[in-house]
């Protein structure tokens, strides 16, 4: 192991590393998701996301909840200078998480068939089986990520995330495209796709006939193409785990020999495991706040969409007239209801939800970075440090979540047409869903770090309670609105909005109550909100005006986003929404703060 003195990153320094890595991961994910969705279509996206939605909550437990539990334990022991306990925490976590990963693997394997029967989507089975092994690799990664996050070193987490994303991109697309091309070649030769006959309506227009053939082959090959794409996710997770194992063996943790010698005798293994479990269970449950809406959608949306169709089939068919895939032709009764349900769910989760999820994913890494700093301040009873870090955390989160959510809402249709120009039907179905999800992204984005902050001050049970109440709200709204034929899939994001709005308000109230911090709401939330409103207005107005003079929709969208971003930055500088303390926590922050203060842009 290295004996070099360990350098700890400040909250915003670590957050900058993680946000940068997350943005890169999201860019890589977009390069993966956009062509995959265009390859799968609405039907194939339904299979892909049915499997992914079962996997995602378990992934979040392994990659968000478990690392946070380890991070808090390590940060607390570093603050107490118990470095031998720090090392022991990693060893025990590795063993415990290996057992957890194997358990998750077998549980998901056993649940695969009952799950597809429950949601009525048998085509998702292959995708579920392909993604199941990744849970084991995720648990291996989580022990190392949590350990280094607790040491306030965010680079291992950042690099492993990028490696995981690159593996998914290269291998996912590398597997999916050959499967689709094989299906098309088989259809051209025999009129079948993987041994099953495919019927295509005869259309006189050659271009329309070609589109109908491609759509029919896409739908028929959907289960196989989706499974091939998901296999890339599993191998990407394995590559990320391999990197962390090799890195730890080669570079170590930079805990010095002097620190180990000065450390008191470590506590017993059983006691360490007991403490780990006592922290991990509520933290892991609290991490589900990231995906509580996905979990409920998983269990309710497709079933209620089927109910909505049976209640008012004419209403649903009229609402999506001209937007349904050719695979529904000739179907009736339960078969037609299930096919439309899978298609609408695929448009919602595959096209709209992936865009919305960018905001809470970005803000969640802020909480990961803030937790060690807040834990240290709480353990050391540093009231000023606690207030500065907490306010900076909330303000930084608002600076990302507010403009992101507002921008998604006002430009929902433009963004979908920009990203999915080859799937205009799916984009049209997803547009009103994404508009509501934009508002949801504001509250979900603000909620993510709140959970970590409560965990940092030892109140890890509170997010679980608030999440449970929010989940009940989501279930009720989903059941009522998704089952309404006039709303159907649009009811799902409305339920998420109610859920996250409640969780944010409840978490913020509890955080201020138990931390004893009197937060300056004007500087932390109101100023960023004002700037975000101006940003959204600029985006909406510029998109409308530019569409009159520029014929290309894609260029209009790109210019509108750039104008909105510029207005937002100017608004932040004019209102001095960023403080000297925020900038000072960045790398070389003191010099940057001095320059900005001289120009009057920060206070």
Image: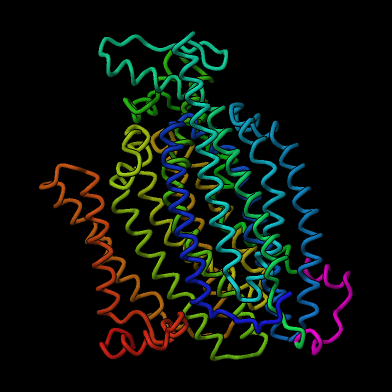
Is residue 537 in view from this perspective?
Answer: no
Is residue 6 in view from this perspective?
Answer: yes
Q: Is residue 462 magenta?
A: no
Residue 87: name its quadrant.
bottom right
Question: In this image, 231 relative to 582: left or right?
Answer: right
**Residue 7 percent across, percent down from the top left:** 60, 82
**Residue 427 percent across, percent down from the top left:** 35, 38
In what quadrant of the picture does the N terminus appear?
A: bottom right
Q: Is residue 194 above or below residue 139?
A: above
Image point (59%, 64%), residue name: 157
Question: In this image, 564 relative to 256: left or right?
Answer: left
Image point (24%, 58%), residue name: 539
Q: Is residue 271 magenta?
A: yes
**Residue 497 percent across, percent down from the top left:** 45, 54
Image point (34%, 30%), residue name: 319
Residue 143: name its quadrant.
bottom right
Q: Which residues are magenta?
A: 259-278
Q: Main secondary structure of the magenta part?
A: helix
Q: Is residue 559 above or below residue 145?
A: above
Of the pair 410 and 521, the residue shown nearer to us: 410
Question: In this image, 240 relative to 317: left or right?
Answer: right
In what quadrant of the picture does the C terminus appear?
A: bottom left
Image point (47%, 74%), residue name: 394
């Amino acid at each position: 192991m290295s004996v070099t003195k360990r350098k700890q990153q400040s909250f915003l320094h670590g957050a900058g590393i993680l946000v940068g890595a997350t943005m890169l991961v999201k860019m890589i994910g977009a390069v993966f998701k956009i062509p995959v969705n265009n390859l799968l279509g609405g039907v194939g996206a339904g299979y892909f996301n049915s499997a992914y939605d079962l996997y995602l909550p378990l992934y979040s437990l392994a990659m968000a909840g478990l690392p946070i539990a380890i991070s808090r334990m390590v940060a607390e022991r570093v603050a107490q200078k118990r470095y031998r306990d720090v090392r022991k925490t990693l060893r025990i976590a590795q063993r415990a998480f290996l057992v957890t990963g194997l358990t998750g693997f077998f549980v998901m394997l056993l649940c695969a068939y009952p799950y597809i029967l429950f949601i009525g989507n048998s085509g998702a089975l292959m995708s579920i089986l392909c993604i199941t092994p990744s849970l084991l690799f995720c648990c291996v990664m989580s022990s190392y990520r949590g350990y280094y996050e607790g040491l306030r070193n965010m680079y291992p987490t950042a690099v492993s995330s990028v490696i995981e994303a690159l593996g998914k991109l290269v291998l996912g697309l590398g597997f999916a495209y050959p499967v689709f091309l094989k299906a098309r070649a088989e259809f051209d030769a025999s009129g079948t796709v993987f041994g099953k006959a495919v019927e295509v309506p005869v259309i006189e227009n050659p271009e329309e006939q070609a589109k109908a053939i491609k759509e029919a082959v896409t739908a028929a090959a959907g289960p196989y193409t989706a499974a091939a794409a998901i296999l890339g996710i599993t191998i990407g997770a394995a590559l990320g785990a391999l990197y962390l194992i090799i890195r730890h063996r080669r570079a170590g943790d930079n805990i010095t020999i002097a620190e180990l010698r000065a450390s008191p005798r470590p506590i017993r293994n059983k006691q360490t495991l007991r403490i780990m479990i006592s922290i991990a269970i509520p933290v892991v449950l609290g991490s589900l706040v990231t995906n509580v809406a996905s979990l409920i959608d998983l269990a309710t949306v497709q079933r209620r969409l089927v109910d909505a169709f049976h209640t008012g089939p004419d209403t649903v068919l009229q609402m999506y007239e001209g937007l349904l895939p050719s695979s529904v032709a000739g179907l009736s009764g339960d078969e037609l209801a299930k096919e439309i349900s899978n298609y609408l769910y695929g448009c919602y989760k595959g096209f709209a939800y992936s865009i919305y999820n960018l905001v809470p994913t970005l803000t969640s890494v802020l909480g990961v970075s803030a937790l060690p700093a807040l834990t240290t301040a709480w353990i050391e009873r540093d009231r000023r440090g606690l207030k500065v870090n907490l306010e900076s955390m909330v303000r930084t989160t608002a600076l990302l979540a507010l403009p992101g959510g507002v921008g998604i809402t006002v430009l929902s249709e433009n963004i979908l047409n920009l990203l999915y120009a080859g799937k205009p039907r799916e984009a049209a179905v997803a547009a009103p869903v994404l508009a509501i999800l934009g508002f949801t992204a504001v509250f979900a984005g603000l909620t993510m770090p709140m959970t970590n902050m409560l965990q940092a001050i030892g109140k890890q049970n509170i997010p679980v309670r608030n999440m449970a109440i929010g989940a009940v709200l989501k279930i009720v709204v989903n059941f009522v609105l998704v089952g309404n034929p006039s709303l159907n899939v649009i009811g799902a994001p409305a339920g998420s909005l109610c859920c996250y709005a409640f969780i944010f308000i409840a978490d913020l109230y509890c955080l201020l109550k138990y931390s004893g911090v009197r937060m300056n709401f004007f500087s932390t939330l109101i100023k960023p909100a004002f700037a975000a409103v101006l940003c959204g207005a600029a985006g909406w107005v510029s998109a409308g005006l530019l569409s009159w003079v520029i014929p290309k929709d894609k260029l209009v969208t790109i210019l509108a986003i750039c104008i909105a971003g510029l207005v937002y930055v100017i608004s932040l500088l004019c209102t001095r929404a960023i403080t000297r303390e925020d900038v000072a926590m960045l790398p070389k922050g003191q010099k940057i703060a001095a320059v900005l203060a001289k120009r009057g842009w920060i206070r």
